[in-house]
Amino acid sequence: MHTLSKNQQIIFDIIDKSPEPMKAYSILFNVQKKGIKAPLQVYRALDKLVEIGKIHKIESRNAFIACQNSSCQVSKATAFSICESCEKVTEINNSSLSKYLSNFKDKAGMKYSKYNLEFFGLCKKCTTK
Amino acid sequence: MHTLSKNQQIIFDIIDKSPEPMKAYSILFNVQKKGIKAPLQVYRALDKLVEIGKIHKIESRNAFIACQNSSCQVSKATAFSICESCEKVTEINNSSLSKYLSNFKDKAGMKYSKYNLEFFGLCKKCTTK
DNA sequence: ATTTAAATGTTATAATATAACACTATGTAA
DNA sequence: TTACATAGTGTTATATTATAACATTTAAAT
Ligand SMILES: [Zn+2]
Ligand SMILES: [Zn+2]
Ligand SMILES: [Zn+2]
Ligand SMILES: [Zn+2]
């Protein structure tokens, strides 16, 4: 089991508590009172947290979210739903989907070791507005 | 059928000719001899070209690629394979995959209108090195 | 011809991310 | 416990990616 360093723990905690994906500079702003002053300190922690699967990057938003899937030890098979109205992001944990994608074979013979899928649409709440 | 404006055509042509995804500022550098001098001119053309499905953005790379799928009129269901060694990117055109993803239903009841999928791994060429 | 929408040109600036270097803490193994 | 290796930190500077705001021009629609 991996033990987080001081900066990693601070930055993980703030992302984990956030109801929405957080951007790097918003994280920075929020941890300055804890002594983390420079972008690099944030980005280094983010890199590590992504690497070990504690957080994921939402590529289309340049934002970071805590892993909501306890079995997701590494960020190598990720899927998210993103509401284009309220920007709510949810990690999808669907074994049929992950099985389908993990077994997907390209005709070009490429061997995949990782994927990231982002669905866009309207969440239930925003649909009824 | 959509007719491209002058800047849109210039920028589409250079992306279409490129064997690899192009970044916005690399595009800018390459079209300066054609009179396009400012980032905004590039980004505006890119936005439009993405909107009409002539190009796609590779989110994990902040780069743009010409649509390799003639039936892809709008960028609302995209899938790519990305080689993490040589950075070669290929648009995946697989009807089983697109059918599966287009019909995918989240248990949260979210209605999806769009998705983007990026596979990562080693291409054939890089596997045998 | 008049109106409307789309595209352009330009300057400035915001937002996102990394390079380089010096230093400190932690774990491992002789 | 001392040496060594690996990971993490702090700091300054800078690179890269993207948008705001405003004036003007072109193309399309009525
Ligand atoms: Zn996860
Ligand atoms: Zn919503
Ligand atoms: Zn396409
Ligand atoms: Zn390759």
Image (spheres, coloured by chain):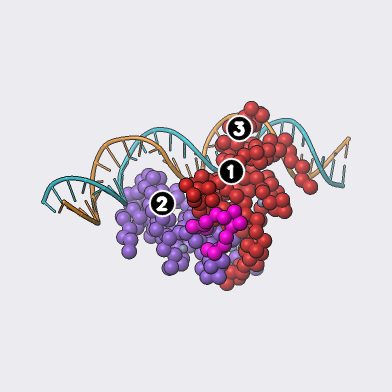
Chain colours: A purple, B red, C orange, D cyan
Range of residues picked out in magenta: A101-115
Residue receiving disc 3: B30
Q: Residue at x 68, y 38 (%)?
A: B13
Name the front one of labels 3 and 2: 3
**For the residues marked 3 and 2, what is the alpha-carbon distance in whole angstroms?**
32 Å
Residue pictured at 31% horizontal, 55% vertical:
A6
Residue B107's x, y, as percent?
57, 72
Q: What amino acid is at disc 2?
A: Asp
Magenta-colored stretch includes residue A109: yes
- Secondary structure, mark 1, is loop
Q: Chain of mark 3?
A: B
Taking depth in this image into account, of B45 and C15 the one nearest to the observer is: B45
Amino acid type of the residue that numbered disc 3 sits on in the rendered structure: Asn
Is disc 2 surrounded by few (<14), some (14 to 19) or many (20+) residues within 10 Å? some
Name which quarter of the figure residue A54 lies in.
bottom left
Cα distance between the residues tagged 2 and 1 = 24 Å
Three-letter code for the amino acid on which mark 1 is drawn: Pro
